[in-house]
Structure formats: C-alpha cells, structure tokens
Amino acid sequence: MYQVKTLVAFAALVMVGVGGAQKVQRAGVNIAGFDFGMTIDGNFTQSQMVPPLKSQGGPDGIGQMQHFAKGDSLNIFRLPVAWQYLVNYKLGGSLDSNNMNVYNELVQGCLGTGALCIIDIHNYARWYQGIVGQGGVTNQDLTSLWSQLASRYKGNSNIVFGLMNEPHDLNINTWAATVQACVTAIRQAGATSQIILLPGDHFTAVGGFSTGSGPALVGVHNLDGSKTNLVFDVHQYLDSDSSGTHTECTHNGVDNLQTLATWLKSNGRMALLSETGGGNTASCQTDVCAELDWMNYHNDVYLGWVAWAAGSFESGVFSGHTYELDLVPAYANGKWTDKPLVSSCVAGKFH
Ligand SMILES: *[C@@H]1O[C@H](CO)[C@@H](O)[C@H](O)[C@H]1NC(C)=O
C-alpha cells in the first residue's frame, strides 16, 4: 500500500511536468532540395537540384512551412543549399545575384512564418574533394561566403547561420580554426547576435561529440570573447548503422544525448539537433518519439530539433520511389496531411 501511494504521488509530479514548461524552445523540419546533387565529398551536380519552390516548377516548400507553422506550431526550419550554387561555382567570388534571389525566396517564405530559419551550407566541409582549410580550398574561400551572407541577412534576428553540414574525415583542431574564422567573419560583417551553429567531425554525430568535436570547438568565440549564441550543431539517426538510410529504427539515441547533455551542462552551452528522423514505421515512431520527448526534459541544454526531411523529397531523383525518411506533407483539396512520424513525434512531441 505504501508503495502504491508513492507511485501515485510520483505520477502526479510527472503530470505537472508534462503540462508545464518541459519542452524545447524550437522544433521543426528540414526543407531540402537546394542541396540535391551534393555528395559527401562536396561534388555538386546542379541538374539534380530541385528547389522546393513553386516558382521554379518544384514542390511548394513555402506552403509546407506555412502548414508546419500554422497547423503544427513548428517554429524552426533548416534550408540546405549547395555552396557552389550560391556563388555560381566561383570559389571565393561574389554571391550570384540570380541564384541568391531564387534561394532567398525560400528564406523569405520561411521568415514569413515567424520561425527561425537556418541557412545550411550543405557541403560536408568540402568544395569538390578538397577539405576547407586543410589541403583543399582556403578558409578565406568559406569566410568570403559567410561574410556576404551575414551582410545580407544581418538585419533579421530569425536567421540562423548553419556554418557547414556534416564535416567528416578531417582534423578537428584544424577545423575548429576554420569554424572560428567563419564566426569572426559573420560577426565582423555586422551580424552580431544571431545564432551560429558550430558543426563537428564525424558528420557532427551526437555520439562521441563530448570527447571529440566538443572539446575542440568549445573555445570558438565571438569578437568580444563571449560564447553567446554559439550553439553546437549535432545530428543523430536511429537506424541500425545510425546512417539515416533505413526505414526501421533500432535505438532511441537517448544514451548519446545524455552523455552530451552532461558535457554541455558542465560547459554552460547548448546544442541543436538539426537532423534526426526515421521512416514512417512503428519502430521509428517509438524511437524518434522517445528521443524527442527526452529532449523536452533537457531543454536547459537542447534548444530543440529539426527533423530530416520535407521539401523536394518526392521530386526529381526521388520521384518514382519512396525516400526512406520522407516527411513531405501531402496536399489535396486545400488541406495538408502530415506523414505519421511528423504528427506523432516531430510535431506531436512539441506539446
Ligand atoms: C566526386 O568527383 C570525383 C572526381 O570526378 C570522383 O572521383 C568522385 O567519385 C566523386 N564522388 C562521388 C561521391 O560521386
């Protein structure tokens, strides 16, 4: 009887938590398409790109975001794009005004929802096979890009600068210097307070971040030496090899998140899970929901999550077969319908 009473009291406390402030600040979805044609070694084939824009003959990425914001209360979107596209293949050159105008339509559509909008340079720390700042192209080639993007978007506090998608197979200490150069360039361009996302090695995986990339990146700082709004950028997939290429999930990733949370807390820092996800399957609904719900209770160190992915995943090279991690909502008769993983977990856990 004593035990039963204790359990009831405990359950009541948990209920208070659920109804209270126990949730992350930000939840949303990646809106992919401007990155299609990019390989993990930084090759880019523009003919495979599918801008998620009706004006470009592509899917209605802006409508998707409006739906996610209004219908699901989601409030962060990540907008992957190829570096080569923004400068029209001119390394270290000016932003290409035509291409920037096309990409900016998606950025403005995102901003119009009131959400945070992440500009994600989706190049795996590479320009073709060369690693930025370590044998390939120079840090200045990348800081030139970021300086121009920061100048263009410095007036909008809802822009987030995602320095680089999934660096891998590089020297992390040398990479930390590249990340520092980008932060300095962005702040010097006048974007003094927007969030900047700092990615690590190993595809910026959550697992191992606290012993590898984290310690290397922890010293990256703003012009005044502070770390304000410098947020670690981490990814995690829950399939058998953690690659995000299978529809079934095998684990919920909470162990890795816990290890990183302890490190973040001891360093007074935060992280954003800017890619996670799974198939629209029972196993992934169980595991992704468990992962995201755990984050709600650790919102002191986790800003939130951005699921992979909606946008153009039912078009171009992906038309005719089902993409494993497809989160594109269906549109019919004036109504959007979410994929099950979105309704149950990505939006469903953002209570
Ligand atoms: C990238 O391009 C190089 C040079 O053409 C090629 O050797 C390599 O296989 C390409 N990478 C991928 C992933 O296609």
Image (cartoon, rainbow, N blue to C red):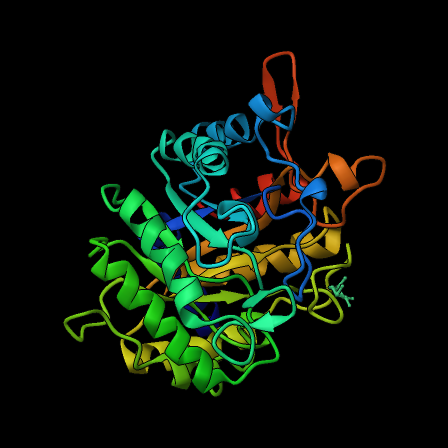
Question: Which residue of the protein is positioned furthest toward the top in this rendering?
Answer: 333
Residue 72, relative to residue 309: is it above or below? Answer: above
Tell me the quarter of the picture where residue 13 sits.
bottom left
Residue 347 at x, y = what percent?
A: 51, 42
Residue 315 at x, y = what percent?
A: 73, 34
Question: What is the tally of numbered marks visible in this picture?
Answer: 0
Say which residue appears at 66% left-offset and 51% top-offset. 285
Question: Which residue of the protein is positioned furthest toward the left in this rendering?
Answer: 224
Q: Is residue 262 visible?
A: no
Residue 196 at x, y = what percent?
A: 34, 60
The residue lying toward the viewer, choosing from 332 and 195, is 195
Say which residue appears at 39% left-offset and 32% top-offset. 108
Q: Is residue 83 visible?
A: yes
**Which quarter shows the C terminus?**
top left
Q: For this view, does 112 lie left or right of residue 202? A: left
Residue 110, relative to residue 129: is it above or below? Answer: above
Say which residue appears at 25% left-offset and 47% top-offset. 154
Q: For this view, does 266 lie left or right of residue 36? A: left
Say which residue appears at 54% left-offset and 68% top-offset. 125
Residue 57, relative to residue 116: is it above or below? Answer: above
Residue 138 at x, y = what percent?
A: 46, 72
Tell me the quarter of the picture where residue 231 sits.
bottom left
Ligand 1 lies in which image quarter? bottom right
Q: For this view, does 279 lie left or right of residue 2? A: right
